[in-house]
Image (tube, rainbow, N blue to C red):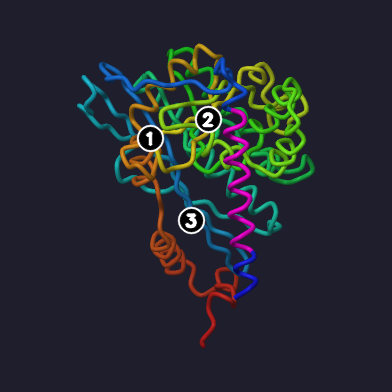
């Protein structure tokens, strides 16, 4: 089809432009201020934990059901090998059920996300206190996404503020136990690195191609550019999570921690996109995290997530069968009441 060919050609051209931009930036950065090599190390006498959550949801005629759980995995390393694997609360743990009534679609979406994150962060806090790992990794960032923040007038806003309090408790608990805290974002759609390059780098370069480079940057996300810019085993410089933290819709809720959240990208596998690592701390913290995370990542050339996070994902995930079992149990106790009727779109007889 001509239209499909047109779309494919456009994608190819855009990628060629980003590849050209990456080469331009590499040649314009002889002092290696934007990227740094990272060395793998033989991990010894170190514990690395990872936390992930699972969730399944079901909307009914009068109620909304949510099942969620948080699970942590702790890898203990000796001379580069995993000597011991521990799970909390268990390798096979029961999910926590929640039921909601008469919520708007928006509040339901916010509430579901809050429930899942609450399970994860509580598990992270308990993991740090029980196992005292050297590093703990979260699946995703170390603060909620701005899309997860309900309006102050929402009925679920109090639940969001309780979640923020849990995050702050996690930050304090990690500091008190000398545990490094980081979040690994596998599919970042951010533009912070591109914005930083545009504002702080291109403006200092005198080259006739600058306008073209700036135009490419404005159409790029960080990982789209960094796939071409970083080589395997390299990371970017550290940059603040937000350039205006006091105006950030979520960071502004974190008070004294607002200025302590930073990020960097790292390419852990040759054929995969870089991962974004958000962490609590400063540049010295990044120097402690990067080698450890690289050393447990990239065991597959096309998939660069840390192995401990992969294991956490496997044990935390929930399936629709879990919700089916829960729903059938509820129905056996309530009978066929209107409030627990399935939605018509889920129960068509044809």
User: What residue is at 42 percent from the left and 67 percent from the top?
Assistant: 328
Q: Which mark is residue 265?
A: 2
Numbered label tally? 3
Which residue is at 26% across, 16% downward? 45
Q: Which mark is residue 306?
A: 1
Q: Quadrant of residue 62?
A: bottom right
User: In the image, which residues are magenta?
Assistant: 7-25
Q: Which mark is residue 178?
A: none
Front-most of 31 and 163? 31
Residue at image position (43%, 14%) is 177
Image quarter where the N terminus lies is bottom right
Report the front residue among 301 and 231. Answer: 231
81 lies left or right of 201: left
Q: Residues within 10 Å of mark 1 (few under 14, many from 20)?
A: many
Mark 1 or 3: the one toward you: 1
Q: Is residue 320 above or below residue 23?
A: below
Q: Based on the picture, tell me whether residue 14 belongs to the magenta stretch.
A: yes
Instruction: Give neighbour class at mark 2: few <14, some 14-19, many 20+ (Cα, 10 Å).
Output: many
Please state the horizontal and vertical placement of residue 163, each as a whole percent of the image.
60, 34
Instruction: Determine which quarter of the picture holds residue 306.
Output: top left
In the rendered image, residue 194, in percent from the top left (x then y), is placed at: 66, 33
Dominant secondary-structure state across the stretch colored magenta: helix
SS assignment at label 2? strand
Mark 3 secondary-structure assignment? strand
Q: Which residue is mark 3?
A: 56
């Amino acid at each position: 089809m001509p239209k499909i060919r047109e779309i494919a050609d456009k994608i190819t051209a855009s990628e060629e432009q980003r590849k050209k931009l990456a080469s331009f930036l590499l040649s314009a950065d002889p002092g290696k201020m934007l990227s740094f090599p990272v060395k793998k190390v033989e991990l010894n006498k170190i514990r690395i934990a990872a936390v992930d959550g699972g969730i399944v949801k079901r909307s009914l005629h009068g109620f909304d059901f949510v099942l969620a759980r948080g699970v942590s995995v702790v890898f203990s390393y000796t001379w580069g090998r995993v000597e011991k694997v521990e799970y909390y609360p268990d390798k096979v743990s029961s999910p926590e059920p929640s039921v909601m009534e008469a919520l708007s679609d928006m509040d339901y979406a916010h509430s579901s996300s809050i429930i899942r994150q609450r399970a994860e962060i509580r598990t992270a806090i308990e993991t740090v206190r029980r196992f005292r790992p050297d590093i703990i990794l979260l699946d995703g960032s170390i603060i909620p996404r701005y899309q997860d923040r309900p309006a102050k007038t929402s009925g679920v806003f109090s639940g969001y503020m309780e979640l923020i309090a849990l995050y702050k408790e996690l930050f304090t608990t990690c500091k008190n136990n000398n545990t490094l805290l980081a979040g690994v974002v596998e599919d970042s759609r951010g533009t912070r690195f591109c914005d930083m390059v545009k504002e702080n780098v291109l403006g200092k370069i005198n080259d006739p191609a600058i306008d073209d480079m700036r135009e490419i940057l404005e159409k790029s996300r960080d990982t789209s550019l960094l796939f071409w810019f970083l080589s395997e085993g390299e990371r970017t410089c550290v940059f603040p999570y937000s350039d205006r933290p006091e105006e950030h819709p979520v960071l502004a809720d974190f008070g004294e921690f607002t200025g302590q959240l930073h990020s960097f990208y790292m390419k852990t596998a040759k054929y995969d996109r870089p991962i974004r690592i958000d962490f609590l701390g400063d540049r010295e913290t990044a120097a402690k995290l990067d080698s450890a995370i690289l050393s447990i990542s990239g065991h597959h050339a096309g998939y660069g997530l840390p192995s401990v996070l992969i294991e956490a994902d496997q044990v935390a995930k929930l399936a629709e069968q879990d919700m089916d079992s829960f729903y059938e149990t509820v129905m056996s106790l309530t009978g066929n009441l209107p409030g627990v009727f399935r939605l018509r779109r889920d129960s068509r007889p044809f």
